[in-house]
Amino acid sequence: MKPQKRQNLTRNQIVFLCIIGLLFLALIPMAVLSLRTTSTNNTSTRTEVAVPKHGKLVLKQAQNYVDVMHISKQDLADQLSAKHYSKAAINYAISHVKTNYDKNALLKGKEYSDSQNMSKQGIYDQLISKGKFTVKQAQYAVDNLQVDYNQNALITAKNYQRDLGFSPAKIREVLISDKNEKFTPAEANYAIQHLND
């Protein structure tokens, strides 16, 4: 009789352990899901940035600058710093402003071409030095500008002839100079050929 009791006891233990094991397996996914949810909630709470004092005001001004003046990120930071806003408010505005700096560079390059009749290289250099755009943004702009650089060279040449009385040879020299206008030789030749049209 004792051996039979021992065998029943072992079966009961096995059944009990199986039940515990199944319950444990059922609880693991629920526990993991609960941890993920808690972790996600904590992360989203941590990534929410408190709006600094004057942050929304500075953001509104920043949005106006990029929409109207088509400025670079660096120029935007400089413009806002000149207004003596706090660094926190400026950083908030720069990180939340909605703009495309490649597009801004393109629009600014078009402004340079339209107002100053610049060469492709001149526009590129101006975007970096004065506009404070990145090399990549400036390259995007000159690669996508729809500009007649021959016409820009001709207008610039006529201005040198009218305002300074330069000879065609001197005008050509200035047009292709790396220190001045930076037009290509072909663009300078076009301008000289049509100087008196």
Image (cartoon, rainbow, N blue to C red):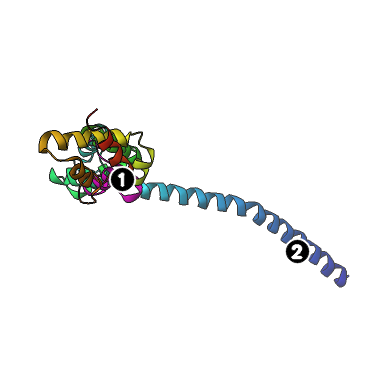
Q: Quadrant of the image for the N terminus?
A: bottom right
In this view, which residue lies farthest toward the top? Answer: 197
Q: Residues within 10 Å of mark 1 (few under 14, many from 20)?
A: some
Q: Quadrant of the C terminus?
A: top left
Over which residues does the magenta segment extend? 116-138
Task: Tell me residue 191's x, y (percent).
Answer: 27, 36
| Residue visible at 87% across and 72% down in the picture | 3
Label 1 sits on what residue type?
Pro
Q: Nearer the viewer, residue 127 or 69?
A: 127
Residue 31 falls left or right of residue 167: right
In space, the residues marked 1 and 2 are separated at their CA atoms by 96 Å
Which mark lies nearer to you, 1 or 2? 1
Q: Which mark is residue 13?
A: 2
Question: Which amino acid type is marked by label 2?
Answer: Gln
The part of the image, by quadrant, that contains residue 190 is: top left
Say which element carries label 1. helix
User: In the rendering, at what x and y percent does residue 164 appear?
Assistant: 10, 38
Magenta highlight on residue 124: yes
Q: Which mark is residue 185?
A: 1
**In the image, residue 34 lies in the stretch drawn in magenta:** no
Q: Is residue 128 left or right of residue 162?
A: right
Residue 44 pos. (x, y %): 41, 47
Asked if residue 122 can be seen in this view, the reply is: yes
Q: Main secondary structure of the magenta part?
A: helix
Which label's residue is closer to the chain start, 1 or 2? Answer: 2
Q: Which residue is at the front of the view, 54 or 134?
A: 134
Residue drawn at the location 34% of the way across and 37% of the way down:
103
Q: Quadrant of residue 138?
A: top left
Please say if the residues under marks 1 and 2 sit with CB atoms less than 8 Å apart. no
